Amino acid sequence: MVKLRLKRCGRKQRIYRIVVIDVRSRREGRDLCKVGFYDPIKKQTYSNVPSILYFLEKGAQPTRTVHDISKKAEVFKELQINKTK
C-alpha cells in the first residue's frame, strides 16, 4: 500500500516534503515520488496537483495532515471534477 506522507527536510528540519512512500518504510526512508512541500512557519505550500491526483486515483491514501493540507489547496475539488468528466 502507498501513502502520501510528510518527510522532514531542510537545515533544521523545519520544512516538510510531501512524498509518495510505501507504508512499510520509515518516515525518513526512500520515497517513490516527491509531489510537493509544506512550510509550517511561513504557511506556504507547493504541490504538484497532477501528480497527487494520479496517485490518489491509483489508490494512495493521504495521512490526516497531508489530507488537511491538500484540502486547503483545493486538490480534492479537482479530483471530483476529474471523476465527473
Image (cartoon, rainbow, N blue to C red):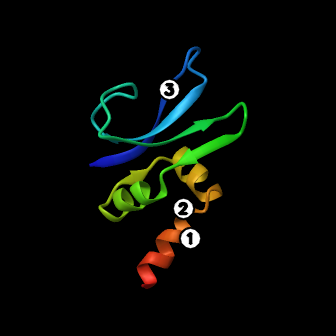
71 sits to left or right of 20: right
- In front: 60, or 78? 78
Q: Nearer the viewer, residue 34 or 8?
A: 34
Comes first in the chain, label 3 or label 1: 3
What is the x, y in percent for residue 35?
A: 43, 45
Image location (x, y in percent) of residue 4: 41, 46
User: Is 74 drawn above or below residue 82 in the view shown?
Assistant: above
Q: Earlier in the sequence, mark 2 or mark 3?
A: 3
Q: Quadrant of residue 30?
A: top left
Q: Amino acid at mark 2?
A: Val
Numbered mark located on residue 77 in the image: 1
What is the CA distance from the residue labelled 2 to the residue labelled 1? 5 Å
Cα gap from disc 2 to disc 3, whole angstroms: 22 Å
Q: Are marks 2 and 1 in contact (CB under 8 Å)?
A: yes
Residue at the spot of label 2: 75
Q: Residues within 10 Å of mark 3 (few under 14, many from 20)?
A: some
* Label 2 Cα crowd, 10 Å radius (few <14 / some 14-19 / many 20+): some
Residue at (44, 76) in percent of width and height:
82
Whether residue 38 is situated above or below residue 71 in the rendered picture: above
Residue under numbered circle 3: 8
Residue 80 placement, left or right of 56 = right
Query: Which residue appears farthest toward the top when viewing the image?
Result: 12
Seen from the viewer's position, the closer of residues 63 and 44 is: 44
Identity, as a three-letter code, of the amino acid under mark 1: Lys
Disc 1 crowd, CA 10 A, few/some/many (<14, 14-19, 20+): few
> Would you identify the image quadrant in which residue 65 lies?
top right
The amino acid marked with disc number 3 is Arg
Residue at screen point 32% across, 60% down: 59
Q: CA distance from mark 3 to mark 1?
A: 27 Å
Q: Is residue 20 left or right of residue 43?
A: left
